Structure formats: structure tokens, C-alpha cells
Image: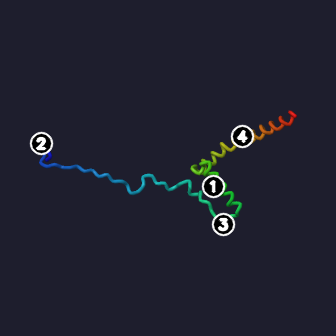
Amino acid sequence: MTALSAGSDSHHEVRTTITYPTTPIMALTKTNTDDLCLPTTGYNPLILRWKKFLYRYHLWTGLYMLETHERIAFHIVVGPVMLAACLYVGVFFDGIVQGWRSSD
């Protein structure tokens, strides 16, 4: 039996119910993977090959997670750095080959 406090004549239980929303709290309506599905018909085979190359490039590098403007900014910043690195490697190997030939 439950002890009653002074001045009360009955025991009241307070029950709280937790309700969860039926709709998600964060709506993910726009995803970056919407444009990644490759078309299979309706294009020139060279265009399909190019689209497949871009699709794989975006997957391998993780760029599919970026918005279009972020991809453009990434390529503006990283593109010249990579071009300079490739040119430097070419000049470096050319110097090695010329040095090798002049040593004979």
C-alpha cells in the first residue's frame, strides 16, 4: 500500500509518453548522387565513354560528394598545381636522360 502525503486523499500516477515524429527531422531531398547514374543509350559512344570516365574519376577521388561549384573551385586550385608537378617530373627525367647520355 502507498503512503499518502498529508492533505491528499488519493494517489495519482503521472505517466509521460514520448512521441517520435513520423517524418524525418532532416529532409535529405538533394543529394549529390542524383546525377551520377550513367545513361546507356541516346548518346554518341565517345560521349558515353567520356561520361563513364568522369563517373569513375568522381568515385575514385571522392569528388562526387562535392557540389558543382565546389568541384570547379577544387579544379581551379589543384589543377595548376598538378600540371606544374607533371611538367616538373618531365623536366626532371629529361635532365636525368641528358646527364646519362653526356656521361658516355
Q: Is residue 31 above or below residue 84?
A: below
Q: Residue at x 18, y 49 (%)?
A: 12
Reading the chain from its start, which is encountered first: label 1 or label 3? Answer: 3
Question: What residue does disc 4 label?
Answer: 85
Three-letter code for the amino acid on which mark 2 is drawn: Ala
Three-letter code for the amino acid on which mark 1 is drawn: Tyr
Q: Position of residue 95 (x, y in %)?
A: 81, 36
Which numbered tag is attached to residue 71?
none
| Distance of label 2 from label 4 (alpha carbons) | 85 Å
Question: What residue does disc 2 label?
Answer: 6
| Distance of label 1 from label 3 (alpha carbons) | 17 Å
Outermost residue on the top side: it is 103
Secondary structure found at label 4: helix
Q: Is residue 59 left or right of residue 1?
A: right
Q: Is residue 21 left or right of residue 81?
A: left
Question: What residue does disc 3 label?
Answer: 42
Reading the chain from its start, which is encountered first: label 4 or label 3? Answer: 3
Q: Position of residue 86 (x, y in %)?
A: 73, 42
Question: What residue does disc 1 label?
Answer: 55
Q: In this rendered view, identify the residue nearer to me: 101 or 67.
A: 101
